Every structure is written in structure tokens, then in C-alpha cells.
């Protein structure tokens, strides 16, 4: 567990640092070049995993994977803001960010187990790397920035100076809230198989049958969360009321996940954990969309990157802690903590961002 924590933490450390650097790079280079370079680096790092010889190698290659992955979500968020108006933005954000990664996580457990039985675990990394090569080629061939931005912003507008961004109360509210809730997602992303194996005695085949369920609920709720929020805006709700209402409902649903500790078997434990992932989809889609509502497209990559760094650093620290807590006690304290962090993060956001409206450098 400690060696596994080290490998996971290496990824989250690089990921958290590169979230900000990658977001800033995308704001200066543009979505097409910035996101393309980030995924190309990620693809190379993924391929290198096929050459792992021990825990040390794995830790290094996970670090490199985090370097490449750091620019992906800022690039996706900026691309959404470039292409979609406010009344369609939340659903598009849900599809492109949370929903897309969730669907990948749904497909990965059974497919990777199957591919590994055919070509070994090294071959599985070669397959995922090959998918990255195809994606990068398609991206550079197909993606173009629209001639007219939906938000009526000048495509040549420069990114805000970092000092001015960091002086905003809204930015600090976004950073602190993500520092609180992101460790929950990191735990679910990296530790569900370990939980099922250690606490529930599940076999590899049973893990493959169950581990995708929380991510399926996440994918569905990401789309629903965006669709509900956009529908409320089209019905006349203010953008702020629509985003905050959906996020509030999601936050107060997450404590249900704590019941996983007393579930009768692995299946019901996963179902209860999936309740939190269902709420996370509603929450995260509207959280990311709120950033686009607040900031111009020229600075969205940077702000998304800053929040990702805050969450990644929290994930790095929590990943180091989880392995030690599990070895010393059990998964129980971790599950309880996960169940209460979203309401706390919601309180931070409501205090820091009383109104959701487009900000400018002059106010």
C-alpha cells in the first residue's frame, strides 16, 4: 500500500503542478496547439509504462504521465467556452470533461482485464498509448477555433496577469473548494480496487465486474447535471442560481456514500459509493461551467489550471495519507471523510462567490 501510494502520489504531484503550467500554456498557445502538445506528451508517457521493471520505474513513469495530463482539462474547458454559449455550456462541459473521463473509466476495467489476458499488462499500456497516437493525429487535423466566439470576446484578448487573478476572491473560493473535494475523487479513482480486494475480499474478476459502476453513474450524472443546469437557464433562471442549485443538491447527497461501510457485500458497497460519484457528476460539471461563466476565454485555461493544482496538491497529500491510514486502521475513516467534504466545499463557494457573472479586470 505504501509503494502504491508513492506511485499514485508521483502522478498527482506532477499533475497538480502541470495543471497550472499547462493551463497557462494553453491560454498563450491557444487550444489547438496547447491541448495537442499535452496529449502527445501524455501518450509518450503512457507507452513508457510498458517498459516498467519495478516500483521505482512505475513511479517515474506515473510522474511523466501527470506532466502530460495536466494540460488536458484546462484545454477542454477553454475549447468548450470557445464553441458554446452560456445556455448550452454546462451540458457541453459535462460531455467533454467529467462525462468523457467517466466513460473511459467505465470501459477501462473490463477492457484492460481482457486485453491483459491476451497480451499481458505491458501490452495493455501499448494499446492505450496507440489510442493516444490516433487521438493526437485526429486533433491536429480536425480542430479549429471558431471565427466568432459565442461569448462575443475578442479572440486576441490577452490572458489576465497572474497577480490580478490571484487577487480575486472568486479565484480563492474556487481554489479552496477544490482543495477540499478533489481528494475524494482521487480516492475513488485510485483506491476502489484496493478497497474491494482488502475490505471485501473481491477477486480480480469481481473487481473487473464492479469497479466500472461508480464511473458509469458519474458519466450519466455529468450529462444530466449539465442538461438540468442549462434547462434552468433557458427557463429564465439566472446562471448563478442554476449552477448553485444543482451543486447544492449534489453536495447534500454525498453523505449517503458513508453507508458503504456497513453494506452486506461488495455489490452494495459499490452501489453506495456510486451515489457519491453520481453527485460528483452534477457537482463537477457545474463547477467547471461556473469558471467559464466568471472568466473570459483568454483566462479560463489558467483558472481551471489553478484549481486543478489546488485539487492535485490535496490529492497528492491525501494519497500519501490513505495508504498509511488503511494499513494502520481500515478504509472506514477515509469513507467517512469523503462523505462530508462536499457540503464543506459548498459553504466555501457560496461565501466566496455570492454572484455568478462575467468578471473584468476593472472590477
Image (cartoon, grey):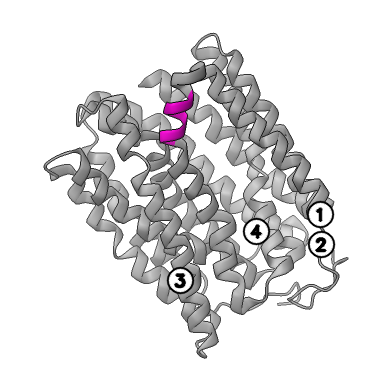
CA distance separating discs 4 and 3: 24 Å
- Asked if residue 248 is positioned above or below residue 284 in the image, the reply reads below
Q: Where is residue 127 in the image (x, y as percent from the top left)?
A: 60, 28
CA distance separating discs 4 and 1: 12 Å
CA distance separating discs 2 and 4: 13 Å
Q: Residue at x 67, y 76 (%)?
A: 85
Q: Nearer the viewer, mark 4 or mark 3?
A: 4
Q: Which residue is drawn at 73% across and 75% down?
A: 360
CA distance separating discs 3 and 1: 33 Å
Q: Give the range drawn in magenta.
A: 109-115
Of the numbered discs 3 and 1, the one sitting upstream in the chain is 1
User: What residue would you read off at disc 1?
Assistant: 30
Of the numbered discs 2 and 3, the one sitting upstream in the chain is 2
User: What residue would you read off at disc 3?
Assistant: 351
User: What residue would you read off at disc 2?
Assistant: 145
Q: Which of marks 2 and 3 is in front?
A: 2
Is residue 139 in the magenta section? no
Residue 224 in the figure: left or right of residue 261: right
- Asked if residue 114 is positioned above or below residue 269 in the image, the reply reads above
Q: How many marks?
A: 4
Whether residue 319 appears in this view of the structure is yes
User: What residue would you read off at disc 4?
Assistant: 77
Amino acid at each position: 500500500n505504501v509503494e502504491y501510494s508513492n506511485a499514485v502520489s508521483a502522478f498527482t504531484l506532477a499533475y497538480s503542478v502541470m495543471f497550472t503550467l499547462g493551463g497557462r500554456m494553453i491560454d498563450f498557445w491557444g487550444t489547438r496547439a496547447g491541448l495537442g502538445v499535452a496529449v502527445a506528451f501524455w501518450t509518450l508517457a503512457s507507452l513508457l509504462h510498458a517498459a516498467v521493471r519495478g516500483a521505482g520505474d512505475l513511479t517515474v513513469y506515473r510522474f511523466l504521465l501527470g506532466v502530460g495530463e495536466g494540460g488536458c482539462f484546462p484545454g477542454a474547458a477553454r475549447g468548450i467556452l470557445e464553441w458554446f454559449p452560456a445556455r448550452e455550456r454546462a451540458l457541453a462541459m459535462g460531455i467533454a470533461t467529467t462525462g468523457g473521463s467517466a466513460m473511459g473509466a467505465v470501459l477501462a476495467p473490463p477492457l484492460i482485464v481482457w486485453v491483459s489476458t491476451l497480451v499481458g499488462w505491458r501490452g495493455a499500456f501499448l494499446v492505450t498509448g496507440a489510442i493516444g497516437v490516433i487521438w493526437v493525429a485526429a486533433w491536429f487535423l480536425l480542430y479549429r477555433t471558431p471565427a466568432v466566439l459565442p461569448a462575443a470576446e475578442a479572440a486576441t484578448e490577452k490572458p489576465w496577469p497572474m497577480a490580478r487573478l490571484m487577487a480575486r476572491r472568486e479565484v480563492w473560493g474556487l481554489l479552496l473548494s477544490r482543495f477540499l473535494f478533489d481528494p475524494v475523487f482521487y480516492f475513488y479513482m485510485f483506491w476502489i480496487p484496493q478497497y474491494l480486494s482488502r475490505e471485501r475480499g473481491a477477486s480480480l474478476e469481481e473487481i473487473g465486474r464492479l469497479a466500472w459502476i461508480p464511473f458509469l453513474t458519474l458519466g450519466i450524472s455529468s450529462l444530466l447535471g449539465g442538461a438540468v443546469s442549462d434547462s434552468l437557464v433557458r427557463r429564465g433562471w439566472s446562471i448563478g442560481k442554476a449552477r448553485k442549485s444543482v451543486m447544492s443538491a449534489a453536495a447534500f447527497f454525498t453523505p449517503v456514500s458513508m453507508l458503504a461501510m456497513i453494506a452486506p457485500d461488495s455489490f452494495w458497497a459499490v452501489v453506495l459509493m456510486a451515489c457519491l460519484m453520481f453527485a460528483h457528476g452534477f457537482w463537477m460539471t457545474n463547477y467547471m461551467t461556473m469558471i467559464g461563466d466568471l472568466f473570459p476565454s483568454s483566462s479560463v485555461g489558467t483558472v481551471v489550471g489553478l484549481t486543478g493544482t489546488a485539487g492535485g496538491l490535496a490529492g497528492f497529500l491525501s494519497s500519501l495519507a490513505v495508504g498509511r491510514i488503511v494499513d494502520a486502521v481500515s478504509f472506514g475513516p477515509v469513507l467517512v471523510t469523503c462523505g462530508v467534504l462536499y457540503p464543506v466545499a459548498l459553504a466555501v463557494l457560496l461565501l466566496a462567490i455570492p454572484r455568478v457573472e462575467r468578471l473584468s479586470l476593472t472590477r
